Amino acid sequence: MWQYILAAIVAFALTALAGKVFIPMLIKLKFGQSIKEDGPNWHMSKQGTPTMGGIIFILPIVIAALVACIPQMLEGDFSHLLVFGFAFAFGAIGFIDDYAKITKKQNKGLSALQKFLLQVAVSVAFFTALRFLGNFSSELFIPFIGTVCEVPWLIYLVFMVFVSVGMVNAVNLTDGIDGLASCVTVPVMMFFIVIAMAFTAPTLGILASATLAALFGFLIYNFNPAKVFMGDTGSLFLGGMVCGLAFAFNVPLILIPVGIIYIAETVSVILQVGYFKLTHGKRLFKMAPIHHHFEMNGWSEKKLCFVFTLITLIGCIVAYFGIITPYIF
């Protein structure tokens, strides 16, 4: 337990300190966010708010995990670094995208195809490497039932890539208002900490603890009214962290209840686009992703963060019972 606490203290302190250093630097470099013109008109007041803020918490997370996991690393356990590496690779794609947006002075960086191909390449390379390192199996755990299905490796690889790319972009869509992606990911990290303790996977639990604390440190600057946005650098990194931990624990299907808000955000966009095309211009929601719909209905950004986080917490509780139920009965 002391390692979890140490990781949390180090990650929170370094993130809070990094915000003091990097935010003025981002302002000086004029790394401001360009706001989408098709978004809520009141969001235009956020124009120029520093973005690429993911760099504020990414480095503190790995430093905290390294410091707190020294005993496990001396015994040869580097599973936390494998998961971090996966998340970092997605964060690097986000960094490239953010930088392209800044240099172009618009809300378009890498094309959708470029991002998709890079994300697929990272996923394929990472999961293939993990297979040869012996860190991942192709056995798929079914929550609540407790059944483990052996899946042919190539089919499982396609499944992993689909889940990873989908979930990472779902987290990215969730990052549409001040603090939302950060707040929603807090209970998700709490869930992984509990699971790590239950199944004795300290390095993964310590990594989740560091991420949790870093998010609290980041929320000092990211909660409404935000002084900095995490950008694709942060949201893609968080998506990679969520997916990496789920696969490291071999419970990817648990992402359905755990990531209920991420999934709802994505589904709302798909439904909106599909309905718009089918009806030749009509809209199912006032605006998508779904958080903008509620904004248009008068919900404040703080209320959205609270309600969506509460829903995620409930989903995480359901997910916990989905994992432990088979072992009880």
Image: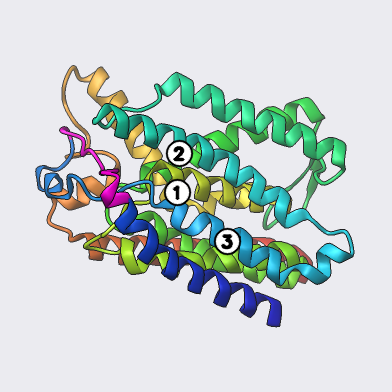
Amino acid carrying mark 1 in the image = Gly
Residue in the image at 54% along x and 69% along y: 11
Residue 2, horizontal then vertical, whole percent: 69, 82
Question: Helix, strand, or loop for circle 3?
Answer: helix
Residue picked out by circle 3: 61
Q: Which mark is residue 234?
A: 1
Image quarter of the C terminus: bottom right
Q: Nearer the viewer, residue 131 or 20?
A: 20
Q: Which mark is residue 215?
A: none
Left or right of 273 in this view: 204: right
Left or right of 151 in this view: 188: left
Q: Main secondary structure of the magenta part?
A: loop
The first of marks 3 and 1 along the sequence is 3
Viewer-nearest of discs 1 and 2? 2
Question: Does the magenta-highlighted stretch encompass residue 2?
Answer: no
The first of marks 3 and 2 along the sequence is 3
Q: How far apart, in angstroms, are the residues tagged by discs 3 and 1?
A: 12 Å
Q: Is residue 319 visible?
A: yes
The residue sitting at the bottom extreme is 2
Q: How far apart, in angstroms, are the residues tagged by discs 3 and 2?
A: 17 Å
Residue 72, horizontal then vertical, whole percent: 82, 67
Left or right of 271 in this view: 286: left
Residue picked out by circle 2: 95
Magenta span of residues: 26-38
Q: How far apart, in angstroms, are the residues tagged by discs 1 and 2?
A: 8 Å
Q: Relative to 25, does residue 159 appear above or below in the rendering?
A: above
Residue in the image at 71% along x and 53% along y: 81
Amino acid carrying mark 2 in the image = Phe
